Amino acid sequence: MRLGQQGGQMTDELVALRWALERSEGGAIAWELACERMPLAVYREIAAHLGLLSGVTVELLPQTSREFDYLQSQVGGLRLTIAAGGEGDRAIAILDHYVARFGPWRRIGSVG
């Protein structure tokens, strides 16, 4: 299995993120992603992993739902910023690793 692929099939959102990264023409990209059933602790784990990568910053976004649901994440998502020359492919591989267990990422916005 290649790095960044679960079962040889990357989710649509991560394919789109890779496409945007490849076409960023040397500029930084910033996307907001969410995984509805992912626990707070896992979001924090992902943020810690991504924070170790060169040229990658991550910020946890607050939950904005007005309705409480035990199965819904306590985090609204994450804002991922990848600088030109940053380790974007590794960031995508890390995000892809969690898809099999928690379900697909959903793009909730882009910044800039």
Image (cartoon, rainbow, N blue to C red):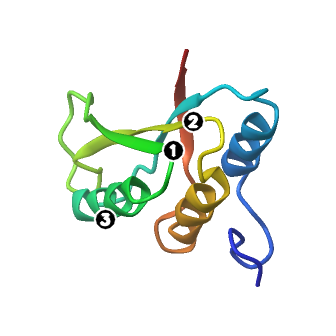
- Residue furthest to the top in view is 112
Q: Is residue 85 above or below residue 93?
A: above
**Element at label 3:** helix
- Residue furthest to the bottom in view is 1
Q: Nearer the viewer, residue 69 or 18?
A: 18
- Residue 5 sits in quarter: bottom right
Q: Position of residue 25 (x, y in %)?
A: 79, 26
- Which residue was labeled with disc 3? 45
Disc on the earlier residue, 2 or 3:
3
Q: Are marks 2 and 3 in contact (CB under 8 Å)?
A: no
- Which residue was labeled with disc 2? 83
Image quadrant for the C terminus?
A: top right
User: What residue type is disc 3 on?
Assistant: Glu
- Which residue was labeled with disc 1? 55
- Using the numbered discs, state the Cα–Cα distance from disc 1 to disc 3 in whole angstroms: 18 Å
Q: Are marks 1 and 3 in contact (CB under 8 Å)?
A: no
Q: Position of residue 88 (x, y in %)?
A: 63, 50
Mark 2 residue crowding within 10 angstroms, few (<14) / some (14–19) / many (20+):
some
Q: Are marks 2 and 1 in contact (CB under 8 Å)?
A: yes
Q: Is residue 92 above or below residue 76?
A: below
- Using the numbered discs, state the Cα–Cα distance from disc 2 to disc 3 in whole angstroms: 21 Å
